[in-house]
Image (tube, rainbow, N blue to C red):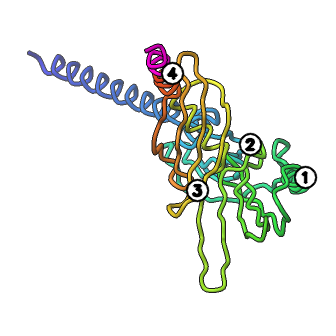
Amino acid sequence: MTTYTKWMISLVVLMITVTVFVIWLIQDRLFETTEQLTVDEASKLVTDLYGGSVEDFEEKNDIYYMTLLRNHLTYDFQVDSKTGNILQVSSVGNKSPDALTNVKTKDEIRILLKDQQRGTVHSISYKDSGEEPQYIVELTEQETLKTLIVNAITGEILSENIKQQNANDHQTVTIISSEKAKQIALSQLNGSVEYVVYEDDSEGGYYLVEIDGENQEATFQIHAISGKVMSVSDNDDDEDDSDAEEDANDDNDDD
């Protein structure tokens, strides 16, 4: 092999090496460009992790600054546009109840409780607890101090905190509402509610809820504090026993 041939082969190898390097460099630059997140991709990343909706965004120095609204709360996010890493999350604060169109006002809650003859309202405070905003209502009913937790959207009384003040001691008891007792009974037997009665006792009281189902009629005894089903009485069985007893008495009369 001549010197000229060797020189040509070396030149070809060098050209191939340079070409491969240039192609690799171009592909690397293109790869970096396609890896950068778009605004939509960054927004989807945040909402998939935290829920809610992105209300505002701004890009600055390869960082997305986003404002997220979730459950009436506002959060500020900083997202790296290249890596997708969430750099910072901070809570801005919650909206007032007046800004939420589906939340009842304090005056509406007062009227609702007055219509139910719930007593004298002393104070109402708003509490945003995520998906179920609430009002905390303090009132006096029949010389008993109560704290009600009221659903701020539906007006349903979720719980009652009863404070019975005596001369010698102070007793605080938390009981479920009659509506909650009905829901517990209906979860056991689907049907129509015939009546709900509260009975007081030394163990915190209980509710008697009678449900008329499609093929069964039963009375549920539900603990007024824990919500536990204490007993279930099948009314159909009671009726059958009564019928059997009446038949037996009739037979005795015939004898």
- Viewer-side residue, 235 vs 116: 235
User: What secondary structure is found at the residue carrying circle 3?
Assistant: strand
Residue 15, image x and y in percent? 31, 24
Q: Which residue is mark 2?
A: 55
Between marks 1 and 4 in the image, the one whose residue lies nearer the viewer: 4
Q: Which residue occupies 46% across, 45% down?
A: 230
Q: Are marks 1 and 4 in contact (CB under 8 Å)?
A: no
Q: Which residue occupies 53% across, 45% down?
A: 222
Q: Is residue 251 magenta?
A: yes
Q: Which residue is mark 4?
A: 246
Q: Which residue is mark 1?
A: 111
- Three-letter code, disc 2: Glu
- Residue 243 appears left or right of 137: left
Q: Are marks 2 and 1 in contact (CB under 8 Å)?
A: no
- Three-letter code, disc 1: Ile
- Residue 255 appears left or right of 199: left
Q: Which residue occupies 56% across, 56% down?
A: 205
First in sequence: mark 3 or mark 2? 2
- Three-letter code, disc 4: Glu
First in sequence: mark 3 or mark 4? 3
First in sequence: mark 1 or mark 4? 1
The circle on residue 89 is: 3
